[in-house]
Image (cartoon, rainbow, N blue to C red):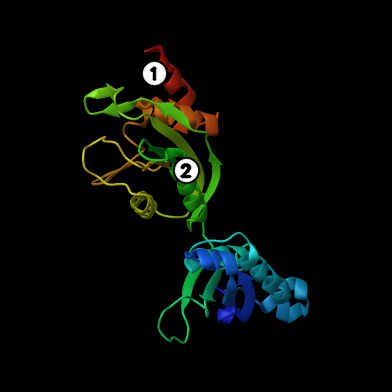
Amino acid sequence: MNPVPGGDRIVLRGVRGFGHHGVLPEERRDGQEFVVDLELELPLSVAAATDRVTATVHYGELAEQVVAAIERDPVDLIETLADRIAGVALQDDRVQRVVVVVHKPAAPIPVPFGDVAVRVERRRADGDRPVVVAMGGNLGDVERTLDAAVAALHRLPGLVVTAVSGSHETIAVTTAGPDGSRPRYRNRVLLGRSSLSPRDLLAALLAIEQVFGRTRGERWGDRTLDLDLIAHGDDAIDEPGLTLPHPRAHERAFVLAPWLEADPQARLAGRGSVRHLLAALEER
């Protein structure tokens, strides 16, 4: 990434929009005003030399896009709203870095306060890698949990989701083998491109599992949500807590079948075609 000459920036403060974001029912029902500040880092020398608005970010249009982002579908957290707005700013390829501050002046806080705000900083990625994430669960409303986890991964900074398979139902597998007495699993595979390191992406997946009630007790036990990092580009890693590609992916039809659905040309590094791997399992 080329450095921004002289630290060039566009600063836009106090953009106001009305939205229905918040955890409380009355916030969703009545809505409230949100105030947004943005700082965009981008080269401005061409705009200065040509004196043309087309050579820079049109801050009037950007302000309208921010208001549209505020007025869109409600979210619980202003952290999520701030990340949404950062994504709007980064749609312009010239923007290399953006800082977004979302103020919630009418937040339901039971004591006097001056302001509450969330600040996020996002940078344009220099490069990204294809990633494969296996998803599954067999406790609770699994389909709803999988839908919510997919939505969370869509919003995860540093990850662009490119495809998600449908759900595949499979028998529970324990350390003792298949167990028909356990609740059956629903499995999906999510494909994307990520600028996160394998460790950072894995940490995000584990954090999302916890949000949706995953507890780690019995090995291969029942769970509300399981997110496994199957592949991160062609990375070959064998470290404590992280092995890539996933060492058992080639043996798991509940990974291979939804993966093949999401990408008919899929290949598992070091093992070959996912289609052939799945066919070999089915022949057994």
Instruction: Return the residue at label 1.
Output: 281
- Disc 2 marks a residue whose amino acid type is Arg
Of residues 221 and 243, the one nearer the viewer is: 221
Q: Residue at x 52, y 35 (%)?
A: 165
The N terminus, quarter of image: bottom right
> Picture coordinates of residue 157 (x, y %)?
48, 59
- From the top left corner, tell me how far across and down residue 30 is, in percent: 59, 69
Amino acid at dot 1: Leu
In this rendered view, identify the residue nearer to me: 191 or 209: 209
Front tag of 1 and 2? 2
Residue assigned mark 2: 144
Say whether disc 1 or disc 2 marks the residue closer to the N-terminus: 2
Q: Kindly report the distance in space between the C-alpha atoms of the residues bearing marks 1 and 2.
A: 29 Å
Whether residue 119 is situated above or below residue 154 in the rendered picture = below
203 vs 155, nearest the viewer: 155
Residue 94 shows up from this direction? no
The crowd level at tag 2 (other Cα within 10 Å; few <14, some 14-19, many 20+) is few
Q: Quadrant of residue 2?
A: bottom right
Residue 216 in the image: x percent, y percent? 25, 45
Q: Is residue 106 above or below residue 156?
A: below
Q: Is residue 177 above or below residue 4?
A: above
- Residue at the (64%, 74%) spot, across then down: 17
Secondary-structure class at tag 1: helix
